[in-house]
Amino acid sequence: MAERTKITLDESQIPRRWYNVIPDLPSPPPPPLHPATLQPVGPDDLAPLFPMELIRQEVATESYIDIPAEVLEVYRLWRPTPLYRAHRLEKALGTPARIYYKYEGNSPVGSHKPNTAVPQAFYNAAEGTKRLTTETGAGQWGSALAFACAQFGLGCEVWMVRASYDQKPHRRTMMEIYGAAVHASPSRATTAGAKVLADEPDSPGSLGIAISEAVEAAGSSADTRYALGSVLNHVLMHQTVIGEEALAQFAAAGEPLPDLIVGCTGGGSNFAGLFLPFLREKLAGRPNPVIRAVEPTAAPSFTRGRYEYDFGDTAGFTPLMKMHTLGHDFIPDPVHAGGLRYHGMSPLLSHAYELGLFEAVAKPQRETFAAAVTFARAEGIVPAPEPSHAIAAVIEEAKRCAESGQPKVILFNLCGHGHFDMVAYERYLSGEMTDFELSAERIDAALARLPAAG
Ligand SMILES: Cc1ncc(COP(=O)(O)O)c(C=O)c1O
């Protein structure tokens, strides 16, 4: 059994419940605050943006929430996803480590993002929403929401970060195939976008700016709401189907549970989705894996940011969230991992990080592409630039195992494929790709503009 390459589950084994880690934590994360009153935000504050069921899930106190049958029906298109043993990568690295990866790239749009896009579209449709707005960095989330809206008959409007819009025109086409309207962000369609363009006409954009635009647009009509692809508690919870399946797959393989779990972090959802069910087991005293987040050196919120209340978007339209932040108007350099170009981090993960429940490292762009190419040549799958951060950290650890002789079991989330990222790969292969130096002065300048939160 241990020599299998692909550990698959039957459709009947798709998890029936999402896991909510909050009741299992030693303390709950600090609440989001209203920026004017500095009081915790209530359901009424969030109702213009989100349907009631998602607001309820955001503050849920129960450990599990049933997945609606209509959502399971759509999940069946690609779930359960396979767990791979990376035999060929292990051989290429000459490591005694046993490397596993959960592959989320076989969803219709090529990443983990539909795991939450589908329930978000479902609950919105059930409560009468006609149209959803959103931002997208890599284009993966925008594609996922466009696909999910098509499943439930909703309109969809996407603000795509300019740097990605220019590099990945086919992601835009994919969203349009599903029926979405797509803007490059910053755009002149919103006052938030027009303000950025007035100051910087060539702005590459950022997730923070695109969120401001999508939130502003959602406020423009009563039957339009907003959907976020990461960061929030309900999004992380929807992604726990990944870790629940992985636990079942390790049991099916008869393999000891991982010594190390790795995931890339933009807003934290794919990493959380993989490790939270393992953390539940760890908190219950069973396995004791090291858990490691990997972020880009261009947007190092865990490793160089501050744990403070800040806005989730650039214009300051969202509630204040206590999180690891580089400052809401910090614009990361235009690295190709567009999904990781976010100034902040999930408040839930930020809290867990402060509790010491996992560690974080940052990787520069070229190291992640070198790792992606090594991985692709061994395993065949061309990874998206975002999970290539996780791959870089896994290869680093596997090489350490080669030196020490330790046969560690390593699990990582291969949360998306890179089929739309060929421009980035071309730049890497031709030697044109650069790393960006992020000065302490730039971070300090953005952090100096943090909002006062008492
Ligand atoms: C393939 C891929 N991985 C990772 C991310 C980062 O998001 P998160 O940290 O929520 O998983 C994105 C976001 O767009 C993405 O598209």
Image (cartoon, rainbow, N blue to C red):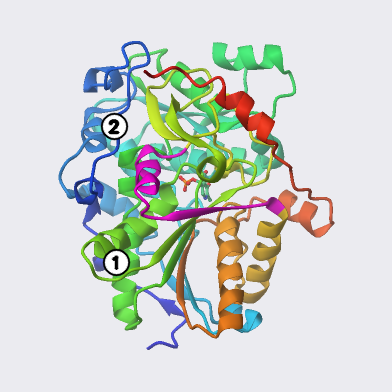
Q: Is residue 132 left or right of residue 182?
A: left
**Secondary structure category for the residue under label 1:** helix
Residue nearest the viewer, comparing 214 with 246: 246
**Secondary structure category for the residue under label 2:** helix
**Pointer 1: what residue?**
11
Residue 296 percent location from the top left of the image: 61, 48
Name the amino acid, label 2.
Answer: Ala
Crowd class of label 1 (few under 14; some 14 to 19; many from 20; radius 10 Å): some
Q: Is residue 195 left or right of residue 201?
A: left
Point out the image quarter for the N terminus.
Answer: bottom left
Q: Which residues are magenta?
A: 345-365
Residue nearest the viewer, comparing 185 with 251: 251
Quarter where residue 321 is shown: top left
Q: CA distance from mark 1 to mark 2?
A: 25 Å
Q: Is residue 349 magenta?
A: yes
Residue occupying image coordinates x 23% and y 18%: 44
Residue nearest the viewer, comparing 113 with 127: 113
Query: Which numbered tag is attached to residue 211?
Result: none
Tag count in the figure? 2
Name the amino acid, label 1.
Answer: Glu
**Pointer 2: what residue?**
125
Crowd class of label 2 (few under 14; some 14 to 19; many from 20; radius 10 Å): some
Residue occupying image coordinates x 23% and y 23%: 43
Point out the image quarter for the C terminus.
Answer: top left
Residue 70 percent location from the top left of the image: 24, 47
Q: Is residue 290 magenta?
A: no
Residue 134 percent location from the top left of the image: 47, 30
Q: Does residue 305 lie above or below 103 as drawn?
A: above
Residue occupying image coordinates x 36% and y 34%: 153
Quarter where residue 56 is shown: top left
Q: Is residue 188 left or right of residue 255?
A: right
